[in-house]
Amino acid sequence: MIRFALIFALAALPVFSAAAPKTSADAKVTFNEHIAPIVFNNCASCHRPGQAGPFSLLSYGDVSKRAQLIRAVTRSRYMPPWHAAPNYGSFADERRLTDEEIELIGKWVEGGMPQGDAAKLPAPPDLPQGWQFGEPDLIVEMEQPYRVPADGSDIYRNFVAAIGTKEEKWVRAIEFRPGARSVMHHSLFKADTSGKARKIDARDEEPGYSGMDAGIRGLVNLGGWAVGGNTRVFPQESPKRLPPNADFIFQSHFHPSGKVETEVSAVGVYFTDKPATRTSIGFQIPPLYGRGADIDIPPGESSFTIRERFTLPAAIELYTVTPHAHYIGKSFKGWAVLPDGEEVPLIHVPDWDFAWQDSYIYAEPLRLPAGTTMHAEIVYDNSAENPHNPHNPPKRVTWGLSSVEEMGSLIFNGLAVREEDTQAIRAEYRKLQRRHVAQAAEQAKKRRRTVRRSGTSGGE
């Protein structure tokens, strides 16, 4: 689950200007002239030593060895991972191959994968080694390794680590490095100045402690990471404040994979000398990850849909949008209706993939005037035909924190056009939150009555 703390995320993957040369219909497609620019520009940032890709794609040998696989995953658009539909919202750093690039890869494979003239091979991409943004100003690492069991239910655990800064700092970016990617679903980042988190941790025999905020007041949100995510970069006007003499908390969600894993999380923190001059606003549609949206999906239902809307009392500039659901999420659509009736596309993810939870950054801040109504629609597929369904045969699925339960929201982040309107936007959004809290309570009562009458558990 991604909370409000996941705000103003910018993709850290480098984007290069080199494009694959165009070819005539009968021209010979070679690696050095045509394929290398595509791979270097779109694949190498992850597919290189020390990064998330399971193998390197930095040379002719690397690429030709997996050419059939590359043709298949690019043709299906499974890779590069980019799930937002084209022409429905304009986003920065799109990891999307053109139809022409996909056709070139196919022709190269079908033509026997020739290497071509070495003089036409572009220089390897100049990618940072290790951390995406270069050496961090501060590295914070879990103080003890945590053993994630092979089996069992999802685990939510907090890990406390010393930060060591003695004065106030402003954070412009945070990069997260999980030790065991196969079991890490997400991690939220908090700072604690009270010392209470460390005391709670000391009472638990295992590293960390269970629960989320554990009743600790005043925790500072510093962002977070979810599977498929990248370095979090905050707007210049709104860096995150890191208080002095604080502990860092990794609030992590693990999903056992069938194999024992050992987790040692780390973050690289990058500072700026400029303090925040504007206040960030984060909100979800629907609120509370859909807790009050009556998510109760019968087995076999392939198009269960929830909808919500929020009307802005003042103008806002949107910077990012992050869809979030679990395994049986199917699609997301967000749009805005301006006061004059014009419809503005916000995002469309027609084929949600739990393994790739991107934050999408608008190419330019998207300004919406006061009186605009923002809409969200989320569809779920709880049928046996859904290859991502964790239940076989399908079971009834309701709202919950576990990955095999469901939730759903579009998470927006932005800045009020006028700083003095920030509180008005937040106050109006709190009304929507309160309505969903009441709806969630009423829906819970209804389900308990149903369970008592039927004598079955709520998840059957």
Image (cartoon, rainbow, N blue to C red):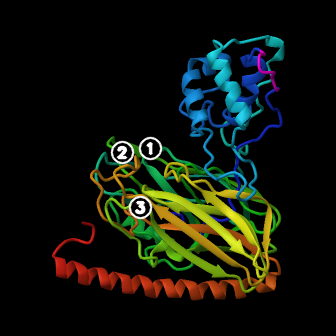
The quarter of the picture where the C terminus appears is bottom left
Q: Is residue 334 left or right of residue 403?
A: right
Q: Which residue is mark 3?
A: 157
Residue under label 1 = 182
Q: Earlier in the sequence, mark 3 or mark 1?
A: 3
SS label for mark 2: loop
Location of residue 32 in the rendering, given as x and y in whole percent from the top left corner: 76, 18
Q: Is residue 317 above or below residue 48?
A: below
Query: Does the CB distance between marks 2 and 1 fall below 8 Å?
Result: yes
Callout 3: 10 Å neighbours few (<14), some, many (20+)?
A: some
Instruction: Establish if 303 lies above or below 138.
Output: below
Measured in 3D between alpha carbons, the distance from the residue under mark 2 to the one under mark 1, in whole angstroms, is 7 Å
First-in-chain label (2 vs 3)? 3
- Is 399 within the magenta? no
Check residue 25 for magenta coloring. Answer: yes
Q: Which range of residues does the magenta coloring cover? A: 22-27
The residue at which mark 2 appears reads as 257
Q: Is residue 259 visible?
A: yes
Name the residue rendered at 60%, 43% in the picture: 81
Judged from this view, the residue extending furthest toward the left is 455
Q: Could you tell me residue 294's position as x and y percent?
A: 41, 76
